[in-house]
Amino acid sequence: NAGVTQTPKFRVLKTGQSMTLLCAQDMNHEYMYWYRQDPGMGLRLIHYSVGEGTTAKGEVPDGYNVSRLKKQNFLLGLESAAPSQTSVYFCASSYLRTEAFFGQGTRLTVV
Amino acid sequence: SQQGEEDPQALSIQEGENATMNCSYKTSINNLQWYRQNSGRGLVHLILIRSNEREKHSGRLRVTLDTSKKSSSLLITASRAADTASYFCATDDLNLFFGTGTRLTVIP
């Protein structure tokens, strides 16, 4: 039972490049979330999904897109990366809005 | 924002002492949760308290909830060096919002 797995763990992008972060969960959870965490700060919600085929904006959605084509996967895309998107990205999943399980994080640097 | 806000931002105590951190939130909730984050790692769920509960225990953790004041507290008793971490509260709405966290340092 892997829980929540994020791919990749580390990535360096040049400004303007695009990339996709993958989050996979094997707990059959309906709810999935993408957060970013900047140094000394809490988690800010980027986008979330309450089920397969659904997505919604969180607190800081600008510059990101998401897709939930399969229940177990939640993809976060950066179409044109900017230095301000340098951060640690966490994915989480939960059954309804109770205990959330987190991935190990993706450290993204945009130069 | 329905974001929870933790207080204090940082707390430093000696091993064996108790640590108390607080969380305030803005809207009605169904449940409130506490999480721990060790440096650079993902968050780990500690405890969930429902809106109709006033107090809950789990091992050395004690959580209280006062819905009239929209606040919660997390007490860690007999702290250990391994408790050094950041602690976050999260409130539910349509999604999970987290506060900025309390950075706890337990000095051996």
Image: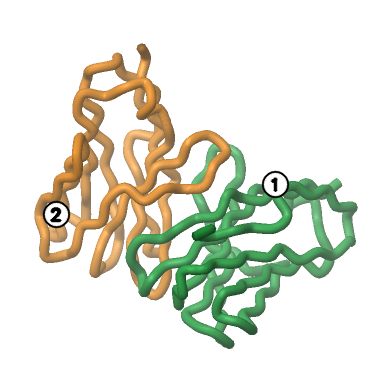
Both marks 1 and 2 on one chain:
no
- Residue A68 position by quadrant: bottom right
Residue designated by label 1: A107
Mark number, residue A68: none
Residue type, mark 1 in image: Arg
- Going by the image, does A57 lie left or right of A97? right
- Going by the image, does B69 lie left or right of A106? left
Residue type, mark 2 in image: Asp
Residue designated by label 2: B66
Query: Chain A's shade in the image?
Result: green
Q: Nearer the viewer, residue A34 or B27?
A: A34
Query: Chain B's shade in the image?
Result: orange
- Going by the image, does A94 lie left or right of B13? right
Q: Is residue A48 above or below residue A2?
A: below
Identify the residue shown where x is 86% and y is 46%.
Answer: A111
Q: CA distance from mark 1 to mark 2?
A: 37 Å
Q: Is residue A60 above or below residue B106?
A: below
| Residue farthest toward the front in the current orientation of the protein | A1
